Amino acid sequence: MEQITRAPRVWIDGVPLLFRSAGVKNYLHHWILHLQRAGLRVRVFPYLTVPGELDHERSVCGTYATFGRLAAWHGLNLVPNHLLDWAARDAGIFHSSKLLNPPRRLGLTATLYDATCWLMPECHTRSNVAAEKAFAERIWKRAAGLIAISESTRNDAVRLLGLDPRRIRVIYPGIPQPYFDAAAETAGRVRSLYGLDREYVLCVGTLEPRKNLATLLDAYELLPAEVRQQYMLVVAGPAGWSSANLKSRLQSLGSDVRYLGYVPEAHMPALFAGATLFAYISLYEGFGFPVAQALAAGVPVLTSAVSSLPELAADAAELVEPRSVEAVRAALLRLLTSETRCSTLARAGRLRAREFTWERCARESLEFFEQVDGRAGV
């Protein structure tokens, strides 16, 4: 309790909560709720209330309120301003997510999610790359402290952007409790809802180039016919940037491949728990929320041996070179024909997932904010 009473009042930039979003919105939603539960005095810019239910597809506000807040955000990003200095006069720290002109008298912090705009700009739109680089120059490079969601992300930021590693603290995100509580025995209702009448390999993620789904489809189609007849491939996630051809392919592959589109968060734990295998061969992840969720649900995981994914999975997943169709095909076949290996991975996954809790993330974030506040002398 002594830590909580010393903690500064923090404004957190919640602009991503107004968009259709996946990983960042997931992070902010759970992070803010658990910081509040831990006793941190949090306000959310631009005057947002974070609901208990997470909806990746919709804003946390109604339509008119969302437009008004987005207009205010765009206006405040155009020029340095004094309005927020007045509005945040009772705060000590501003944690920026999208705002380029935060209150100037407060300690400035931000979260490092990934460095893909530098490492693989071809996987993003030009406008997204430009916005991320502007944010790095105006926020990351002058922040008093930064949170990195993995060691991999921290190392990339230091190497590519020249950031001072002493200002960056690695604080892992958490996994929501429903994923730990999910069980294959209780997944029947969700399987029935989506017409999943066979065992399945699951892949979850927005359809976009970085997720590398085309390689997974190539590898799956090369499996023996009898394996594909036993295990269908189920893909869940909304269409994203440059996804039209991939979405068309998914919808034309017949009964062995099912594309579910966006699946509400309430259904996700059971969808994970009902899977025989979770396959996620992304080309780069700052953390890898879907992999963490699969580990918690006790599903054996096949994932990429790149970026943060080996760090996240440790020895609790099968790792593969994501750009090699043959390597992915061989790993799929190996796992789908070995109950022993899958059982071992499932047990190890649940143990590994216990290291990633939102309560721990909130506690370490409180310590981070206290340290930044102390250095700033607020």
Image: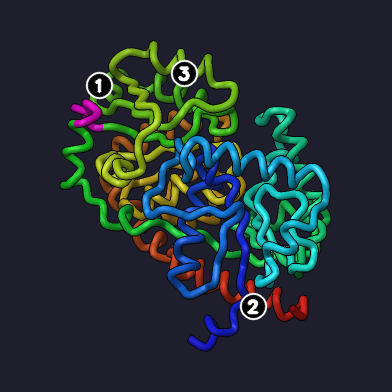
Residue 175 location (% of width, % of height):
41, 57
Dot 1 corresponds to which residue?
229
Identify the amino acid type marked 3.
Lys
Residue 219 relative to residue 285: left or right? left
Image marks 1 and 2: residues in contact by CB distance under 8 Å? no
Majority secondary structure of the magenta segment? loop
Residue at mark 3 to residue at mark 2: CA–CA distance: 46 Å
Mark 1 or mark 2, which is nearer to you?
2
* 245 over 109 or under it: above or below: above
Q: Which residue is drawn at 51% across and 59% down?
A: 173
Mark 3 or mark 2, which is nearer to you?
2
- Label 1 or label 2, whichever comes before in sequence order: 1
- Label 3 or label 2, whichever comes before in sequence order: 3
Which one is nearer the viewer's eye here, 344 or 298? 298
Badge 2 marks a residue whose secondary structure is helix
* 253 over 208 or under it: above or below: above
Identify the amino acid type marked 2.
Glu
The stretch of residues the image draws in magenta is 193-199
Can you tell which quarter of the image residue 68 is in? top right
